Amino acid sequence: MALAPSTYAGVADIVATLVLLTEFAMLRAALLRSQVRIYAFQSLVVTALTLEIAAVRHIGALYALAALTFVLKVVIVPALVSRLLHDADVDLAGSPVLGVASMALIAIAVSAFGFFAAGSLHVHSPTLPATALAIAVAAVLVAFVLIVLRADVVSQAMGFFSVENSVYVATLVLAAGLPLILEVAFLFDLLVAVVVIGVIMRVHHGRTRTLSTEELDRLKG
Amino acid sequence: MPAVLVTLLVFPFAVSVATFFLPVRASRVVSVVSGTAAFVLALVLVPTAADHSQVAAGSLLRVDALSVVFLVATAFLYATTSLFAGGYLHLAKNAAGARYGRRFYAGLNLFCWSMLAALLVNGLALLWVAVEITTVVSALLAAIDDTDGATEAAWKYVLIASLGLGIALLATIVMYYAGTTVFGGSYSLSYAKMLGGAGHFPAGAVRVAFVLSVLGFGTKMGLVPVHTWLPDAHSEAPTPVSALLSGALLAICFYAILRFFQITVRAIGPTFPRTVLLIFGLASLLLAALYLLSQRDMKRLLAYSSVEHMGILAIGMSFGVPIAIFGVLLHVLCHAAAKGTAFFGAGSVLRKFGLKDMAKIRGGIGALPWSGPMLVAAVLALSALPPFGIFRSEFLIVSGGLSDPHDVVTAVLVVLVTLAFFGLSWFTTQTMLSPNVTEPASGNGAVVTPPKGEVSTWIVASMAAGLLALTILGVHPPAALSHLLDHAVHELGVPR
């Protein structure tokens, strides 16, 4: 058995790492606008992974899915959110709780935890890239940090979209052997969730005229 | 029989599409017909599922005794909720009202369709897909009223539930990963296959998958500490949607956890999954019982009662003895009927008095001669008063607990359920039974006193159906149903 990872596993690892790194970039982004752009880039990377798997495994439907991912996640959703930002006329991102440095430190700790926790599963399969799974788990946790510490709908939505991208990567690399219909259903479903979150974000803005979630405190107890 | 499964999957979906185009008056009737048809079809499946191990249609659709239990509960609520919605919706006679009605009915039917689909599909992957559809549809339904509260609740719901489902998807993927050691890199996650190979799955991966599934699906099931969206969404959504969320959707997420439970028990034995469920169940029950004591909003009260009952389900599963598991599955059916009826009653009060704040409402029973007493009965049923079904199911769960070394847990369970009973019945009886007099001392205005009379006979009919079902389940469950529950207990890996 070869010690070096195959090209396929290598690409999967690189994509998972890029997703993780873009999340750190989101954490430190000072403008909501740039956060949206970073998300568009992250989605582009994920689209590339879809194409790679489609080519390596000769799965025709994945090309269609890649096209759909590109149109929705790289073009339409970022465009919609950018328009929302333009309408709302706010652009400064930031956490009301912690500074950028502390957020990055927490994210590093959390991602290390995720990486090693997933690594300690000790499931070795010759066909599946295990490192990519561990990195994807770390990326999910970092996105959670973003959601928890930021208090505006755009950051929280971007955090969820990143969770979605990370899980998408995990699904693509690990479950590429799933019957096609299941895989397409998975990924399409995630796209629908992204769109619905976008819709509710607009409803929120239309209703409250703000993007902040700090006023969402009427319902409690 | 396979035709029944296909019909159950296709018909409500077609109805959902149709109601988007039909006028509201037609949609009311069509939805009731669709709900009733679904319920009848679910009942048709009962004897077969109780006798055979499974009914399948192709490789994608399959039900066994376990899924039929949840199918009956969901389809029952589909039927009664459509009936209730017919009396509850008061639409403005203009374009906006018509648009609201069309969206509402299309959404309602689509929501029920997605829940039925979750129970009909074969395999963890499709189950996740269906549950995700329930989330997006119900989030849009929760936001449909377009008030400040609805917007806030919908945002919290969609964000928290989607994140939960993200975790649930990870659980599914990790379980798939565990399976690759037995089946190789390419296989479907169908239940029979997973259960067959589970004995050889690596323990570590299965453990992680189970915890992730409880955390992920538990978010939508309303387990503490990941329940935070639940009271908001239940109180701000239109009441028919609240009834479906509480009675059916939470149970379906419990069903998803049970599917992981089944596999986990076969892979690593029952001790670990039971402990996990016990921790989440006790936390849910404790927190819900305390919150029930301090509620003023009637729908939030019922929402916390849902958290309480989901906690009871989780604790009942953790007891692990057949009689307790039987009680848990019966509890799913009873909770659907009781919580549905209670929400219908709350909706009736809401329409009658125009407010949710219970402290301002008095004499509900005088104003609502039918739905008032039935609401009180439903709340008492929720608190496990005989002759209603929840008395029987909780009795079975508790006796299962007492037969085990879990004595302490059982005692805690009984204490907390009593506390919840106190909170639930105190506020409801105060609202409904205390005499209808204006309190001069209270600064927040006079008590509203609408004239006596029902809001709608549709509402009364839906509540009567719920109470009838509860009484049947409590007094003497039909033999076929007991047989079905027995079989489902067996499928959960617990010897009879």
Image: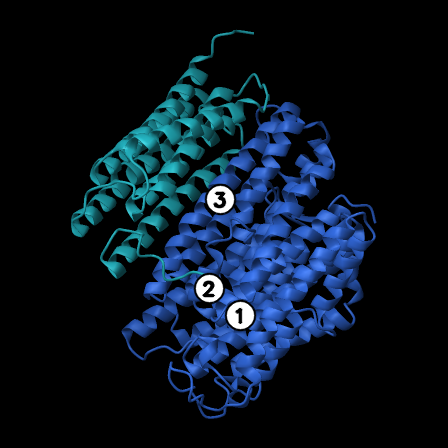
Q: Earlier in the sequence, mark 1 or mark 3?
A: 1
Rendering coords of residue A55 (x, y %) = 40, 22
Q: Is residue B57 left or right of residue A150?
A: right
Callout 3 amino acid: Leu
Separation of marks 2 and 1 at Cα, in angstroms: 9 Å
Callout 1 amino acid: Thr
Same chain for mark 2 and mark 1? The answer is yes
Q: Which residue is mark 1?
A: B81
Image quadrant of residue B213?
top right
Give the cyan chain's letter: A
Rendering coords of residue A163 (x, y %) = 41, 37
Comparing labels 3 and 2, the label whose residue is closer to the camera:
3
User: Residue at 63% of width from left, 62% of height from top?
Assistant: B73
Can the viewer see residue A61?
Answer: no
Q: Earlier in the sequence, mark 3 or mark 2?
A: 2
Q: Nearer the viewer, residue B7 or B471?
A: B471
Number of numbered discs overlaid on the protein picture: 3
Same chain for mark 1 and mark 3? The answer is yes
How many neighbours does mark 2 have within 10 angstroms: few (below 14), some (14-19), or many (20 or more)? Answer: many
Do callouts 2 and 1 mark residues in contact (Cβ within 8 Å)? yes
User: Residue at 29% of width from left, 77% of height from top?
Assistant: B94
Q: Which residue is mark 3?
A: B165
Q: Colour of chain B?
A: blue
Separation of marks 3 and 2 at Cα, in angstroms: 21 Å
Chain letter of disc 3 in the image? B
